[in-house]
Structure formats: C-alpha cells, structure tokens
Amino acid sequence: MAHSTQAFRGGTATLNDRSLLALVALLRRLEEREPDARLSAIVAAWYRAAEVSGPGTIDLTLDTLLTDDAAADFLAERLRRVAQEAGDVVPGAELNGAALPTGIVFSDFPADALREGIDALLALIARDGR
Amino acid sequence: MSSGTNFAYIPPVSTAPLSINLPTISVTAGPPDPIGGGGALPGDGSYGDPIAGFHQINQQFADNQRAFSERMDAQSAAFNAALTEQAAARSAQMQSQTDANLASMNAQRAAMSAPPITGPILPPSFLRAAQAALPPVAPGLLAFDQAPPPAIPAEAPPQAPDPALAAAGLAAAPGATFGEGLLAGAEVIGAALPSAARILPAATGVGAFLYGLFGNTGTIPSDAAETQMRLESEARMQALGLRPGQTVPDAAPPEGGTAPEAPADAVPTLPGAFGPVPAFAGLDPALFAAGGPALGFAPLPDGAFAPLPGFAPAVPNLGPEGFTPALPGFGALPGFAAAPPQGLALPGLTPAQPMPPLPGFGPVDPAMTGVVTLEARSLGDLRGDLTDTIGLRARQLELGDDPALGGYRQAEGIAGVRLEQALGRRIDRSADPAYDFVDRILGPISLKGPLPERGSLEGLRNSVIRDAMGGNTATRVLVVDTLGLSDQQFETLRNDVANGTQGTQKTIIFLR
C-alpha cells in the first residue's frame, strides 16, 4: 500500500494509506456517535482529501485544520479514543460502510497497523508527544 | 274390535241449549286526535293540521339526516387522515428499510467480489502498450513516455545504454534498441519483425528456445475461413474415401501392380488430425518445415500447420507474466526480453553456448540451446484485444491486492501493471507494509498516483516532493504514475518535481 507523507509545523510523518483511510472512516463513526462540530470539520476535510487523492498522495492538511494547540489537543484526544476502541481487528464491513471515496475495498483490518499509524500521527501533532 | 271397519264415527249427543256471546260495537265521535289532526281541516295551518305535522316531521327528519351526515363526514375525514398518516409512516419505514437493505447488499457485494472495471482502462494490448522513446531526463529523474514509437531500422546497431539508466537496472538487451530492452513494447517488436517467424540456420543448432513476447501467438482464422478450410479438407478426404480421423493409407503396391500415386493435395498422414489446423497460418512454411516439429507442429501442404500427435501445441501461455512454453525442457522466461530486429541478434550462440543472461531479466534456462523467434503480435481484432484485456485485468487485480494489510485498491493495480509494462518485467507486490512494490533490479518502490478523475495535481506534486526529500526513508525509488494527466499537466508536474527535489538521493520514475 502506498504511503502518504503528512506535514505539520515543519515536521513530517509518513503513514500507510490504508491505515490512514481506516482512521478517517473510524473518526467518522465516532463523529456519528458523538457529534462535535470540530470533529465534523476535520472528518469532512479528510474525506475531501481522500476524494482528490491517488495512492501515496493523501494530504490531511494538518497545518490548515489545526490552527492552535487546543485544536491539536482535541484531535489527539479523538485519535486516542479510536485507538482504544479498535480492538484486535477492525471489521472490513465497518470500514467499507463509511463509504470512503477512494476505490478501496477493505478486508478486516489489523488494529495494530491502525494504532501504528495513529501513533505516528500523534507524534506529529501532539505537543508532548504522548 | 267392532263390525269389521277402522273408521266408524258416532256423533255426540247434545245435552245443553246453544248460545253465542257477540261483542258490542258502537260508533261515536271521539275526542280530537292531536297527532292525527283530529278536529282540524287539512291545510288550515292549525295545531291539528295533519299537513303541518307532516312538514314538521319532514323537517325533523331532514335535520336529523343532515346532522348524521355531518357526523359521518367528520368521522370519515378523521379516518382518512389517520389512514393517510399511517400510510405515510409505513411508506417511510419501508423506504428506509429498502435503503438499508440495498446499502447492506452493496457493501457485501463490494466486499465479496472484485470491483468492476471502472476508471482508467489499461491499454488493451501489450502490443500497443508501452513505447520505446524516452524523453530527456533530468538528473535523478527517469521518464517513460508512451509517445508514438520511432521507426526502428531492421538492422539497427546496438546502442550503448544510458549509464544512468543502466545503474537503475533499465539497461537494454544486447542487440536491441534501447526501447526494446527497456520496455515491454510489443509494438516496437511488431514493427521491427517481419510477419513470418524466423528460425536460426541449422548450422547454429536450431533447437527449441522460444524467445519472444507474450501476447497472441498465431492467426486466428475467421469463422468463414475456417469453414472454408474444413470444407476443402472434407472434400479431399471424401475423394480419398477417408472418414474423419482416418489417415491416408500406406501406399503398399497391390499384387501385380504398382503403388497408386497419392494426389498432390492429399492430407498428410497425421493421426488424429482432421484437416488442416491453421494454428499458425500466417507463419512462413519454411520455418516449420525445419523447426515446426520441435514446437509440436507439422507443416501441411497448404501452408497451415497441424499439431503432432502427443504434443500439446507449443503455444505460449498468454498473460502478462510472460509465457511458459508447453514443450519439455523449456523454462519460463522471467520477463520479456527484447527480440532482435531480424529475429536473430545473438551472434555466436551455439548449442554448447547457452543463452547468456540478459541484463535485467535474470538467468536463462541453460537447457535452451537455440533460438526460434516467434513474432507475438496482436491481431487487433476483438478476440485479441479481449485476451489482452483479460490478462491485464487479472494482473491488475493481483497487484492491487495488498498482502500486508489486506484489501484491494484499484488505482494501485493499474499503476502496478503500467509499471510492469514500462519495465518490461514482472514486479512483486510488497509483503512489507512499508513500501508498495518490489522489483528485483530497482528494489523497494514507493508509488505516487495515479490521480482520480478530479484529483489534485498540487497534491500529487507535494507528495512526490515530500517523499523524495526525506519524508519516506523506506525506499530509494519513487514511481509517479501520471495516468490521466494532460501533456501540459505532465510537463508542469515534472518540472515542479525536478525543481523541488534538488539534491534528492532517490530515483524518481515518471510513468507517462
């Protein structure tokens, strides 16, 4: 699977596309359960990013979305929630049900790979690196 | 019993005088009946007027009827409203259920079956797939253009490969033009080779080394031509008194006579052959006169070829993975190797001197001791295109499937097949999630693109630059698939990337 490099405040992190897209799908599920305007804006922006991207070219536009520390902390907290709730395997049907506009058909997704991507993203955006 | 009859009647004897009490009936003028209008004249409007009473009763009846109608109307309206409301709720419920069912079915279908062929369709034929010409490359950049191929002279002298490309494992095969060795450009081969297959002179040890390109392997006759040939064959056999499957009898001389001379156009004695099998009708009969049997075919007088008994036709298996000759001793070529312009460009090859490994194509089976170059050409007809398309589609599904994390991504399969066409050899899908493909020459490969229909060119550019400038340390080769970009977009992208990746240690390959 291709990898997309994310940039934030001068740093970069390279994430596997499948992990990244699985994360977007699960964030949408979380936003559906617990509606939040800030999370809705992030999820909508990442859906658009997925729609216009090919393999290895997904740009999460973190610098645009996370304009202050509070926003970064908010996203970091949601990312940790997703990592905690993932279990061992994320069912492929749940990911496919999120209707990501990428031409991807998910199989059951190993949660370890998802957490690995989340950790890379957290290291990029979390101020204290947690 | 009495007098012999059952029905004797004896009348009773009267003991008292007969009397009847009749009721008394009197007729008098009774008191006026207020209801019946007693005492009043009809129509005088008085209290006892029976007509006025009728009108009153009629009015009461009409009032009651009106009130009843109003009540019924109100009840009907209420009932209708309730029904309408229930129907709307039921309809919404059923629509919701239907939508949910359809969504579930679509999700299940998508998860269970391969995605349909959508989006960019790969070139239908390998023979028209990749091209030879390479544009000038910037340092650190390689690009494969699929512009119309240049005319290649029949006896083009070998060219020294570009050192930069050679270092990247893209060296040309000896005796071939650069593009031939670099790309699986069957169109190049098709343009350079004559239509007939050629065979090495016997002095060089003609044997059985099929050396070519996957694709269609022979002329498939039209239905009409096949019917015509079959009819002609049957006529000849009928003239000889043969049945299908029979062979021409041995010409044993009859006693006291001479052997009958077989007709010039008699079907040769090929057990099991029923008429000409035009598997390679377009090939040179002289070729198969010498080398055909080695391939499992025998020449027929009319220029066609029939499979020898016991042989599977030496038809290479079609497919992007290269061909696998059916004859024993033939090893599968790991990838396409450039064929020489005249079908033979490996001077000095003898049976004792096996084919040397070609750059980028791995070792060749040493059991192969000769060269027969078959032109693998696409007929350009529907069947040829379909065969190629099916093969490409199968390969696309393989390369789009991620063995590391599971799942399928169509765009990656497309890019993988296009990269194979450009390199002229197979690549492998990476089992390591850190990178995408593995080429035995280039090593681990990162992939960028192709973009979807409404893709962001800026996003593609930024991602390439980020990856090349240290964002991804897992690979040293970056492949950028520019499928779908216009010429102007492609040039813009390439220039921007060249300017933005100064000093990169990576090799960036553009697929055009």
Image (cartoon, coloured by chain):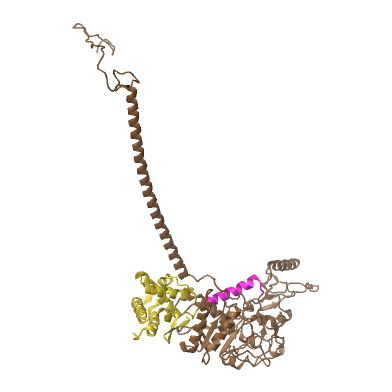
Chain colours: A yellow, B brown
Q: Position of residue B372 (x, y in %)?
A: 67, 84
Q: Nearer the viewer, residue B89 or B63?
A: B63
**Where residue B400 appears, x then y in whole percent?**
50, 77
**In the image: residue B117, left or right of residue B292:** left
Q: Position of residue A126 (x, y in %)?
A: 36, 84
Q: Residue B280 in the image: state x and y as whole percent.
A: 68, 76
State whether the magenta stretch is mostly helix, strand or loop. helix
What segment is highlighted magenta in the picture? B379-396
- In this rendering, is residue A83 above or below A11? above
Question: Along the horizontal axis of the image, is B235 left or right of A46?
Answer: right
Q: Is residue B437 visible?
A: no
Image-quadrant location for residue B386: bottom right
Compare residues B403 and B321 and report the one nearer the observer: B403
- Residue B243 appears in which quarter of the rendering? bottom right
Residue placed furthest toward the front: B45
Determine if residue B152 is in view: yes
The residue at the far left in this view is B16
- The quadrant in which the N terminus of chain B is found is top left
Query: B357 and B96: which one is in front?
Result: B96
